[in-house]
Amino acid sequence: MQGLTRVVIQNNRTGGHQVEKPSLTNPLAPCSASSPDSDMQASVFRVFPGAWSRSGARVTMSQDYRDLTAVDVEDDDDEIQLRKASQKRSPGLSWRQRICPSRRLVLILLGVSTILTIAIIVFGSKGSQRSSQLSGMRDTLTSLNQSIGDGIVSLQQKGTDTATKITQLEAKVKKLTEEAEAAKTRLLSQMTTLQRSFRGMNCDLQNFKNNRTEACCPKGWDIFRKSCYWESRLGRPWEEAKADCEARDAHLVIINSYEEQRFVAVRVRPQFMWIGLSDATGSWKWVDGTPYTVRQSDWAPGQPDNWYGHGLGGGEDCAHLHHDGSWNDDHCSRNYGWVCEMEAVD
């Protein structure tokens, strides 16, 4: 883009003829060489060659005044035309204002650039520190995970060893328990044998004293045919009575005949006494496992009835002797007396 300045030259030699010469203004002049107001105006070079003649003769004052007036008028017209042309080309800022920013804008941009540079340096330094810290933490976590993994493997191995030892101990305990039960059984058998031997020796001694050969029973027991009987009038549940008889190398009485029933009934009156008969398994059996077939003549009228109205829970599964010698079923938790029976010693 070029600015056009009209230069009017008058001199005496041309007789006042006006010569227009185009003049180019430098669009790349330094931005600081002009103010915003001067940017709206084109640079005009005024040349007054007519002020002096070639021969060096000085013109008159009136002629000079006219020449200057003509030049000023032409300059004013040129300036107005340049302003109009500039407004048509750029309705806003001039081309110099658009190309060359003001000093304030340059300083602002320079400050922002400096701040951004400092921020990048600071954040870059912090990022490097954070990266170093994260790397250290990663190494620490890796080492910790390795230690935990080794610990878990060690604990699993110890757990396996402990489980093996527990299994071995359980097997040993089971074996020792079985051996203890077997030893207990053998001991009880030996005690029973010793008791029977003692009873036999005592029976032989009594027969020798009395000069007889009859079967005999332990002291305090009553003999009937080939059996000995002993009764307790203390009240206990059926299961406890059964256990007491077994501890005496006997069992709860098993009645096999009417005569035996009458013999036992006479000795237990007027109390209720447990006998070795129950139907806890659903059918009546004697304590030695022998099944019993119900005969109504053995029982009291209407018995056995397996009554549930006693409020003790369940039915009536255990048999006892009534005060008249007949049988009755009752709840096994009742506290009744009991009769024990054992074989007499020949």
Image (cartoon, rainbow, N blue to C red):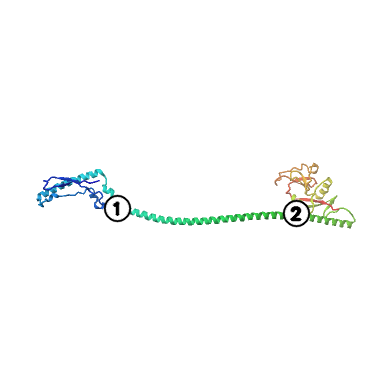
The mark tally for this picture is 2
Residue 163 on image: x %, y %:
64, 54
| Residue ID for mark 2 | 182
Sooner in the amino-acid sequence: mark 1 or mark 2 = 1
Residue 241 on image: x %, y %:
76, 51
| Residue ID for mark 1 | 104
Hey, which residue is sitting farthest right in the picture? 211
Q: Classify residue 151 as left or right of residue 245.
A: left
Residue type at mark 1? Arg
The residue that appears at 24% across and 52% down in the rendered structure is: 33
273 or 113, which lies in front?
Answer: 113
Label 1 to label 2: alpha-carbon separation: 112 Å
Instruction: Classify mark 2: residues with Cα within 10 Å, few (<14), some (14-19) or many (20+).
Output: few
104 or 142, which lies in front?
Answer: 142
Closer to the observer: label 1 or label 2? 1
51 or 177, which lies in front?
Answer: 51
Residue type at mark 2? Ala
Q: Classify residue 57 as left or right of residue 283.
A: left
Q: Which mark is residue 343?
A: none
91 in relation to 118, above or below: above
Residue 219 in view here: no
Residue 132 on image: x %, y %:
46, 57
The residue that appears at 55% across and 56% down in the rendered structure is: 148
273 or 223, which lies in front?
Answer: 223
Looking at the rendering, which quadrant does residue 129 occupy?
A: bottom left
Query: Tag 1, which secondary structure?
Result: helix
Looking at the rendering, which quadrant does residue 216 occupy?
A: bottom right
Q: Classify residue 320 as left or right of residue 4.
A: right
Hey, which residue is sitting farthest front in the picture? 55
